[in-house]
Image (cartoon, helix red, strand yellow):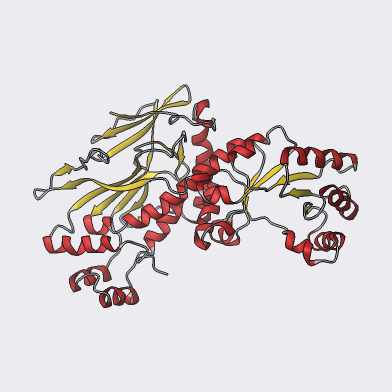
Amino acid sequence: MTSALLTDRYELTMIDAAMRSGHHDRACVFEVFARRLPEGRRYGVVAGTGRFLDLVRDFRFDDAELGWLRDHGVVTQPTLDWLADYRFRGSISGYQEGELYFPNSPILVVEGGFAEAVILETLALSVFNYDSAIASAAARMVSAADGRPIAEMGSRRTGERSAVAAARAAFVAGFGATSNLEAGREWGVPTMGTAAHAFTLLHDSEEEAFRAQVAALGSGTTLLVDTYDVAAAVELAIEVAGTGLGAVRIDSGDLPAQVAAVRAQLDALGAVNTKITVTNDLDEYTIAALRAAPVDSYGVGTSVVTGSGHPASSMVYKLVARKDAAGTWVSVAKRSAAKATVGGKKHPVRSIENGVAVAETIYVGSEPAPSDTERPLLVPLMVDGKPVIEYLGAHGTGVARAHRAAAMAEMPAQAFRLGRGEPAIPTVYA
């Protein structure tokens, strides 16, 4: 299915006007960056790269799309003819998916003719603004969980396609699994899930429901114990499944007190290896507050798929350089006081001292010489219109997840504080 109309009308009307002026093929460089991090956040996580490359590969104007544009008078016939042959044939580089970013980090660099590159603006921002917001929030939750498994289960709290993107982004950020099956099929994210309260309510008794679930899924399953009375349900769960019951799930109540009571009850019943998972409107702050409680794993829904209060990353797509009539590269930038940009192609590096990141250093114009203390951040993502296979599909999702862990390991300790603060490292222009 084509992704060509997942865009804004003005992308096409700009192309239409540029074709009239004869500048539509002028070589250009566009960059995606965020002017700032969400208030109080100390870093962001790049996510969505694999999805974006897939969408660019499928960005085609077929007869149906061209007919709709013609019927609605969006562009003129010469532009329709140009769109009919559209394939992105330029180059894209960017931060590797899973990389951390900071204010003004050029996380994506798109190079090509004006028309072929500008048309990708809305698509790029739709993907990176959402996916990076989810990954950034999810990474904070992973840090708060302090090594305990955490699963994404927010499909019912967002749009059906956003749910898939969110599950993937959360996995890149360190979540261990998702409830969303399409994310498992499409992106290789491990899936999990057992039963909701409706399953218990379906049966004539809680015991009947527990026995049915254990018969279907085995004693290693997770039984939901807060439909009626938690203490009674825990006792019943062990009676039905035995002391080898995999886990119990708690989805309501005063969690610190509830978890402590359930752990004591399980131990008294001999179910010392039965784990406790909690899933009650969690975010990074409630997860952190449960560090001292005997929780074994977490499930997060609404907070993760909404970016924990910041559902977009405030990223923009800006033209920073173009060739003039003589074929010479010219830096271009907005000059408005509130939204001024820095012109020129950028070459960002992560400055490292003793294995710890100390700055996001951005070289403008000339690429810096290799250095043992500077890690280059841009990697090729698409060359001559062909995506780099390493970053596609389920394999690419795994690559991004591993890179996120490595990038986090470079961060100074203050990066992981949940309290409000400045970016963990400064952005410096060189």
- Residue at image position (53%, 31%) is 419
Q: In this view, does 229 lie to the left or right of 300?
A: right
Q: Residue 312: x percent and y percent?
A: 43, 48
Up/down of 289 relative to 60, above or below: above
Q: In this view, does 123 lie to the left or right of 366?
A: right
- Residue at image position (46%, 36%) is 43
- Report the residue that reaches farthest toward the top: 354
Which residue is at the front of the view, 353 or 257? 257
**The N terminus sits in image quarter:** bottom left
Q: Residue 366: x percent and y percent?
A: 24, 34
**The C terminus sits in image quarter:** top left
The quadrant where residue 359 appears: top left
- Residue at image position (54%, 51%) is 305
Q: In this view, does 94 lie to the left or right of 210?
A: left
Q: Residue 190: x percent and y percent?
A: 62, 53
Which residue is at the front of the view, 206 or 409? 206
- Residue at image position (53%, 45%) is 308
Q: Is residue 148 left or right of residue 218?
A: left
Q: Residue 106: x percent and y percent?
A: 34, 41
